[in-house]
Amino acid sequence: MRSSTARTAITLCAAASLAAVMGTASAAPQSPEAAQAPRPKQSTPVLVDCLWKPDVRPTDFILACGDGNSRLVALHWSHWNQNSAVARGVNMVNDCKPYCAAGKFHSYPVVVKLDHPQAWKKKPHQRHYTQMTLVYTHDRPEGFDRTVSYPLWN
């Protein structure tokens, strides 16, 4: 029995010593080379559509997912980077007069800006834009301001 107790005591001491050494090594400050090592590049943010599909530089985008009465078409992107994206296009908006099924779509030229990228809840490793701003460059839908911002779904 004595040899079994001695082996157990030696094993526990060895494990404690190893744990102490590993704890000290992991708590040690990084070398200057490690601190300056390049970080992995962040992924390019995406625009998430009504069907929860990510897209980069889409040519069209539905704003009113429930009924499709407002959508962006003919989008031409001038840039798309880690912080923002900008495009010119047309906002097609149903006037819903006398009601939406009988309404007519009207075209309004817009500048579209996407920004505030954050991690996407569905795919946390993927970033997505969380805000869209439309600037109407000529006419605009009745009751709309010249500049309108929308939070984008997550």
Image: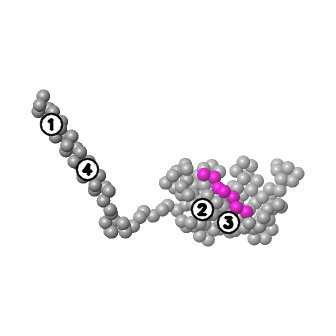
As measured in the structure, the alpha-carbon distance from the residue carrying label 3 to the one carrying label 2 is 14 Å
Residue 102 horizontal side relative to residue 25, left or right: right
Instruction: Tell me the residue that label 3 is attached to.
Output: 112
Please identify, in this view, whether the residue under mark 1 or under mark 3 is nearer the observer. Answer: 1
Q: Which residues are magenta?
A: 148-154
The answer to whether marks 1 and 3 mark residues whose Cβ atoms lie closer than 8 Å is no
> Looking at the picture, how far across and down is residue 48, in whole percent?
60, 55
Instruction: Tell me the residue that label 1 is attached to.
Output: 7
Please report whichever mark, 2 or 1, sits nearer to the chain's N-terminal start: 1
Disc 1 crowd, CA 10 A, few/some/many (<14, 14-19, 20+): few
SS at badge 3: strand
> Split into 4 quadrants, where in the image is the N terminus?
top left
SS at badge 4: helix
Please identify, in this view, whether the residue under mark 4 or under mark 2 is nearer the observer. Answer: 4
Please identify, in this view, whether the residue under mark 3 or under mark 2 is nearer the observer. Answer: 2
- Where on the picture, by quarter, is residue 29? bottom left
Instruction: Tell me the residue that label 2 is attached to.
Output: 116
As measured in the structure, the alpha-carbon distance from the residue carrying label 4 to the one carrying label 3 is 57 Å
Instruction: Tell me the residue that label 4 is attached to.
Output: 20
As measured in the structure, the alpha-carbon distance from the residue carrying label 2 to the one carrying label 1 is 60 Å
As measured in the structure, the alpha-carbon distance from the residue carrying label 4 to the one carrying label 2 is 44 Å
As measured in the structure, the alpha-carbon distance from the residue carrying label 1 to the one carrying label 3 is 72 Å
From the viewer's side, name the closer residue of 54 and 16: 16
